[in-house]
Image (cartoon, rainbow, N blue to C red):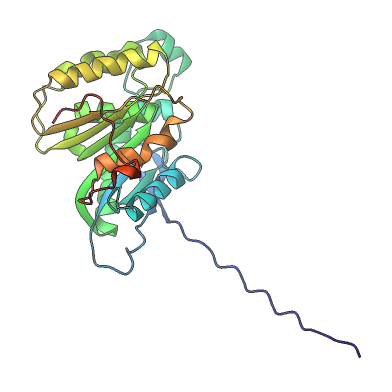
Amino acid sequence: MALTCAASAAAQPVPITVGETHTLASKPLAQERVVNVYLPADYATSAKTYPVLYLIDGGLDQDFLHIAGTSALGALWARSQDVIVVGIATKDRRRELTGPTQDAALIKEFPTAGGSAAFRAFIRDEVMPMVAKSYRTSGETGVIGESLAGLFIVETYLNEPDLFDHYAAISPSLWWDDERLAKASAALLVKPSAKPHRLYLTIANEGREMQTGLDRLTAALGASSRSGQSWCYAPRPDLTHATIYHTVSPEALQYLFPTAVEQDPKSGFDLSCQSPKS
């Protein structure tokens, strides 16, 4: 007697939705730009408002998935708050993330460099209004980025501190333009801010060229009297430029968007600020 069995039809796969993509026609940048948005897990089922974390280098082939995942896991552990992650993709990082330079060698090697003011205008005048209009935001903001994006974040903190509430600069490239920004930091920190800010700084084991600029900046921060300023310097000499971002991003979000939950000391969620000031 022959036995026959009908194979059940395989269930069709269901797409996994990580976020949404917006394409903006930017006037300051004179081109279309991509903005990716991750929403917290309970966004669709709640009426809550959420802080917004802006991510520089936020393309799908850059750091968007990394930081979206970090924020989701941080919220799951109550290590950091649920946040809307807005990933701002970059195209020409030297152009968009560096300030003007008079260094002939840099201009020759990177002829498009120096457009950070236009990129900041794109964020301020186009990205942030779109996010406020499209999503339930609480009004609290933060920004995170690494390397040249870290340089851009430090430049923004020094020159336009009230653009964001909180800042995280991971191994910022303060060597750029012979440390011009770091050397000017003490004078720039005299600028008042209208609201309090948190600033998270860290650097890997990256040699003197990278380290001296950050040493200048932390010295200026330590001497600064800018009101409402809280900062955390958490160097990681055990890491490299290639490994630091994924390692420290959970701690950075914990500092920028803390929760009221008292963590078990065994969790390993302690902040390792070396020279904090508040």
At 36% across and 41% down in the image, what residue appears?
A: 250
Q: Which residue is drawn at 42% across and 25% down?
A: 94
In the displayed orientation, state which residue is furthest to the bottom.
Answer: 1
Name the side, left or right, on which 77 lies relative to 273.
Answer: right
The quadrant of the image that shows the N terminus is: bottom right
Furthest residue to the right? 1
Residue 217 point in image, percent of width and height:
24, 19
**Location of residue 44 with respect to 161 vertically, above or below:** below
Residue 30 placement (x, y as % from top left) = 38, 38
Q: Quadrant of residue 42?
A: bottom left
Quarter of the C terminus within the rendering: top left
Residue 12 in the image: x percent, y percent? 62, 72
Q: Which of 6 and 33 is in front in this view?
A: 6
**Can see residue 155?**
yes
Tell me which corner region of the image, top left, top right, bottom left or bottom right, holds residue 255.
top left
Residue 197 or 151: which is nearer the viewer? Answer: 197
Q: Compared to 127, does 108 lie above or below?
A: above
